[in-house]
Image: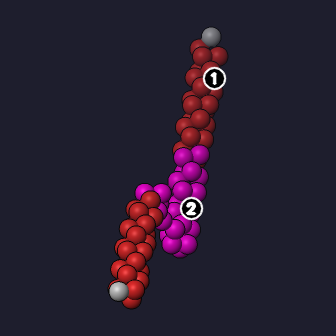
Amino acid sequence: MTKSRDLLDKLSKLVEQGITNYKDLSSEIINLCQTKRNDFIFKMKLTSKEETEIIKKRLEKVEKKLEEMQKKKKSKKVK
């Protein structure tokens, strides 16, 4: 009986260590992939969604100002 319990204990420890190692390995692979993705994005000089929205809003403001300036310039020429 004791031999079978010892055997079962050893097998359970092996399975437990295997699962732990598998989780560690999978989390390590995920971390490596995220790091590579971030490096790639940094090299491509891409912006985040929030930055893109801010840039769009700024561009719209500048375009409005440009249109106003062009209208003022045309009205001055007509007078």
The local secondary structure at tag 2 comes to helix
Locate residue 13, reporting x and y percent. 57, 29
Return the residue at label 1.
7
**Numbered label tally:** 2
Return the residue at label 2.
37
Determine crowd level at label 2: few under 14, some 14-19, many 20+ residues with C-alpha closer than 10 A: few
Side (left or right) of 52 relative to 25: left
Q: 51 or 78: which is nearer to us?
A: 78
Quarter of the image with the C terminus is bottom left
The local secondary structure at tag 1 comes to helix
Q: 65 or 37: which is nearer to us?
A: 65
CB contact under 8 Å: marks 1 and 2: no
- The amino acid on which the numbered mark 1 sits, given as a three-letter code, is Leu
Q: Quadrant of residue 20?
A: top right
Distance CA(mark 1)–CA(mark 2): 45 Å
For image coordinates 59% across by 35% down, the residue present is: 19
For image coordinates 52% across by 68% down, the residue present is: 46
Determine crowd level at label 1: few under 14, some 14-19, many 20+ residues with C-alpha closer than 10 A: few
Q: Quadrant of residue 40?
A: bottom right
Locate residue 47, reporting x and y percent. 48, 65
In the rendered structure, which disc, 1 or 2, sits on the residue that comes first in sequence?
1
Q: Is residue 39 visible?
A: no
- The amino acid on which the numbered mark 2 sits, given as a three-letter code, is Arg
For image coordinates 59% across by 52% down, the residue present is: 29
Query: What is the chief secondary structure element of the magenta stretch?
Result: helix
**Residue 16, numbered label:** none
Locate residue 61, reporting x and y percent. 38, 68
Q: 54 or 16: which is nearer to us?
A: 54
Magenta span has 29? yes
Q: Which residues are magenta?
A: 26-52
Side (left or right) of 34 relative to 55: right
